[in-house]
Image: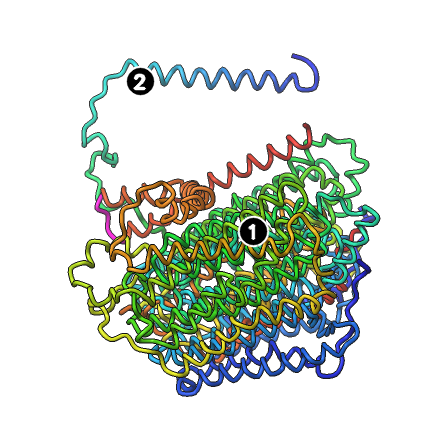
Amino acid sequence: MDGYLGSYATLGILLLVAGAFFAVAYTANRLLRTNAPSAAKSTTYECGLDPAGGDWAQAQIRYYVYAFLYALFAVESVFLFPWATVFDALGMITVAEMGVFVAVLALGLLYAWRKGVLSWTTA
Amino acid sequence: MNDIQLPPIDYAALLPMLIVFGLACVGILAEAFVPRKHRFAVQATLTLAALIAGLVTVIINRDLEVTTIGGAVTIDGAGLFLQGIILVLGIVAFGLIAERRLERGGAFVANAAHAADSDGDKKQLNEAGATEIFPLTLFAIAGMMLFCVSGDLLTMFVALEVFSLPLYLMCGLARRRRLLSQESALKYFLLGAFASAFFLYGVALIYGYAGSVQLVAIKQSVLDSDKSGVLLAAGLALLAIGLLFKAAAVPFHVWTPDVYQGAPTPITALMAACVKAAAFGGLLRVFNVAFETTSWDWRPVITAVAMATMIVGSILAVTQTDIKRLLAYSSIANAGYLLVGVVSLGGAVGSSMFYLVAYGFSVLAAFGMVTLVRDADGEATHLSRWAGLGKGSPLFSAMFTIIMLGFAGIPLTSGFSSKFALFSSAWDANQSALVIVGVLSSVVLAFPYLKVVVLLWLNPPGDETPTVSVPGYLTRAVVGVGVLATIVLGVAPSWLLDMVNSAGTFLAK
Amino acid sequence: MDSITYADATGALSSMWLLVAIPAVSAAVLLLLGKRADKWGHWLGVAAVLAAFGLAVTYFFQLKGLDNRSAALNLFEFIHIGGLEVNVGLLFDPLTAVFVLLITGVGFLIHVYAVGYMSHDPGRRRFFAYFNLFVAAMLLLVLGDNYVMLYAGWEGVGLASYLLISFWYERPAAATAGKKAFLINRVGDVGFALAIFLMFATFGTTDYAKVFNGVLESEAGQTVSAGVLLALGLLLLLGACGKSGQFPLQTWLPDAMEGPTPVSALIHAATMVTAGVYMIARSATIFNANETAQTVVVSIGALTLLIGCIIGCAKDGIKRVLAYSTVSQIGYMFLAVGLGGGAYALGIIHLLAHGFFKAGLFLGAGSVMHGMKDQEDIRRYGGLWKHMKITWATFGLGWLAIIGMFPFSGFFTKDPIILSAFNREGWTGWLYGGAALLGAGLTAFYMTRLFVLTFHGKPRWEMEKHGDHHADGDEAHHAGIKQTADGRDIQHPHESPLIMTIPLIVLALGSVFAGYLMSTSVVDWLTPVLGDAPEEHGRLSHGTVTVLTLGVVVIGAAIAFLLFRNGTELVERPARTHIVRAARNNLYADRFNELVFELPGRLLTRALVWVDNRGVDGIVNGLAAAFGGGSGRLRRLQTGYVRTYALSILSGAVLVVAALLAVRLG
């Protein structure tokens, strides 16, 4: 258990043991259990209620849009903070460049606003 | 902290991409503020103007050789030529995208997110389509342009995503067969994301090996890096997988038939022509610049992939019964031929680019004509429906015949001259085994094309033979240009071959 | 041989591109004008070929006056890439000249004939368009000055032939035959295409002059290995076998007879199928440089000529017999060009003579079928000479010519080939000479059988009873026999109109005189291209071979006459011997091809389809049907699961990574 790959060997053995444990446990279970399938057992469990409707459902798209916009501006601020600490040393050109960056994102926001994405109720 | 140096930026060299990106942003503004009834005209004009301006600036820049933004972008002869190809093919594809006479409201729906067959979805069947398609096209094309001139792998990845994301969305916008279209978009997105992850992981491993993501630095590191070669080999493999996915090489081709079939036909055309050019532009650059010195390592593997791609693509094309799926498998086989060019490295770059031009024009015309064969439910793509079209629409059938003969590689069409040029360069590069497989598979591949020709002319028209729509002037122009290019590049290809050869190769310093 | 140079074209010859352009333009006009050209389209087609013929004659006399006997015309650069430069250039030299004259001359006669033959066909304009397209491609094939041009013409004639064989697409047999011709030809084309790439890799060019000079230099200096030259020869030969219907790719040619008869006459007898002979003669330098390749050519020629004869004896369809005789006669030509040296010229003159008499025979057969309501079975002919005298006379002359009877043309062209075969050095001379002699006897037998059964004896079409048709339905189908449309046989056979008989007469004159005229002059004419005439000394003298051949021919013809002068049974007798059974089944060539080429291909396709879909389509559709899901659900599942796709990408990725690592570390 030494050398460059020694610690990996330990990990490998652990993985093997884990896999073997899993296999033994499940095989034992399969051998020991009784097997009595019924239709009622295969239905979806819904807190004691009879399941209704199909298994396909549509999520409200607006949650997604909000999450998306949030991620966008979170990323923007990730860029803005380090820039803010050095821009005075690099001159006006970096201010302009960051302006372009923010403007591109603002453009997206503008588009979203015009399309009515930002208000919850309008279609 | 204060020793950060700003990399110099050569704005003139970037101008073509800046124009297309910039006008795409303007397109979004137009989408937000131009009244609905003028939107289509404004967007279409804007898009065409952007593409033409981009092309003009590429032509002005034609002799430029420069590495800029700290090595992120390498403008060189081959890169500029590839940008030119993408822009020219993009202009032609624009004709199909902007066509609104074949179907009321165009080939696209306004809202891709409605569940298929829901009430909202049914309502929008008769509404005008989304004009967002135009800025999306511009973003995709600009991404492809950047992809071809990326000087480092990260820029390449960003470009890959920039052109992929709009495509995923556009795939879901088909007006008819909504479910198929949505399915194709989702499949393309999921598998594309999967492949992108491979690409990114490959970049990480290569960075571990070379200490840099710049293509030129990777080439240098092969000579003097002290890291394990495993990093390089595994990184190269994963990177290649990401690229081969976009190029639709076997075994990473599985998405192609479904996506080609489900996507709106103009978008399929855009993918088959422009994305193919971009993907192979990227592949050619990566292998010629960064990994040329390690070609002993990857050549056997990519050779095997190329052979598998040619064989699988051509044989499965034989069994297809849907024209769009047939063209999809043919595009897979053509990816195999192009991979022959990649494996052959330096000498074959010119003929590969020629092949991309020749194939791009033909495939645009082919899909353009697919949009014309319609019945009450939209396009009739099942081959049985095409039987006997030659009787009622001889001109259409004659043109489609020319395109099919071109694909089949019959002499005096671009399919012959391009295959001939490509295989000759490959043979010159001692890739004779690949050439033999290529010739054999192109023989097999000729069969499905000729089958379509026979179907058009020699089969009796069925009761359900659909009509060929009278094309609007845009589609007419696309088909005309494509057919003309197929013939001209077949009869007198030498001027373009001279051009690709004098365009030079990739800048590797 | 000295190095090969071609002089630049001057004077009238600088317009030789017109030869290709005129029929091509005519074809385009006929196709594009559509129905508007229905009334006069066929005359345009005829005029185009006539114009080409006139030009060909002019060029021929021009060429005769030139010292170098060659005229090269460089039109424009086609492909220039790396070290490879291919030009669109034409070359008119003695070899090309005779082919151009044959193509346009015989082509013109057949065009005229087709005006009459196709007069009732609604697709006549389309037919002439394809016909002109074929002539243009064939002329390109023989006029090109490099192998890429030759290949362009080669593919062009293949395409035209495909379209013309499937012309009567309502007949399933015609569609199948077209497909078969296309596929088998593609097998040959692979060889040709690879030969071109090999040529480029070895000599850096595909121009005739440069390639041949390269071969000559390499012979002197051993710069190119013998293996490369052999590979080049064999690949070219594979292409030639495909196009010319030689063993083992001969099976498509007889099936190609499903096309209209003028097509059989022009394409599948007189011109296109001789393209392989042209290619080998053109590449004489390459084959001369390699003895093994020559031996293979000779063997294929000898084998094919026997195969053609044997199957020809067992067939009952008039066009089928003629088709197998074509296979066999082209075998003679291959034999000749494979013998090398001066025998090349013998192959070419046999080709020219064959062009005349075979075209005449096919057109004669067409004339018989025209008068017999498309009945093809010679067992149901007989005694027709009274009813169609011109056809009888011209067909008879063609028959005498093909069996090589003195003094008809076949005699002057076939005899020297047999002689040359005998005079080949070593024991193989006896083998090839014997095969050629045996072939001559068999040819005499089956052609006499054909002639006697068709034109003499009692008319068997009168004895026909209605009920007989069903007994041999299946067999009849195999032999390519068509029942008449109303199920009854013809009561009144009649001679064909003048427009069909005049070409017959002209071609018959050709079958009589062409052989003698060409046997001396053409050999000298071709010397600049193919080398000197054969030496007269050898193990057998000219006189001996002539007597032997004539004797064998007379015996063959006499046996056939005695056996068949009283006609034959209407229904095929069951085959008593294996050889008859084999011959009726085309010597199992189809089954052989199926086993060797088709079956692996089909299995591979099936395997790939299964792997590609992982059986998903089948299983999923089955499941969906079993669950009785709605149409929406079925559609959603139909194209396969994305997770299956992802899995296949992942396994591909694992493979690629593993392979690269293996390469790296291994």
Q: Amino acid at mark 2?
A: Arg
* Spot occupied by residue C289 in the image (x, y as percentages of width and height): 73, 50
* B10 within the magenta span: no
- The reply, left or right, for residue A12 in relation to residue B426 is left
- The reply, left or right, for residue B95 in relation to residue C347 is left
> What whole-number distance in Å separates the C-alpha atoms at marks 2 and 1?
73 Å
Q: Which residue shows up at 50% across the image and 71% down it?
A: B31
Location of the C terminus of chain A (image quadrant):
bottom left
- The reply, left or right, for residue C420 in relation to residue C400 is right
Q: Name the residue nearer the viewer: C32 or C393.
A: C393
User: For numbered disc 1, what is the local secondary structure?
Assistant: helix
Residue identifier under label 1: C301
Q: Name the residue nearer the viewer: C525 or B229.
A: C525
Residue identifier under label 2: A30
* Spot occupied by residue A120 in the image (x, y as percentages of width and height): 39, 60
Indicate the chain on which mark 1 is placed: C
Q: Residues within 10 Å of mark 1 (few under 14, many from 20)?
A: many
* C628 within the magenta span: yes
Q: Amino acid at mark 1?
A: Gly
Residue C327, placed above or below residue B455: above
User: What residue range appears in magenta?
Assistant: C627-631
Question: Which scheme is used to colour this image of the protein?
Answer: rainbow
Q: Name the residue nearer the viewer: C596 or B463.
A: C596
Residue C44, placed above or below residue B422: below
Do callouts 2 and 1 point to residues on the same chain?
no
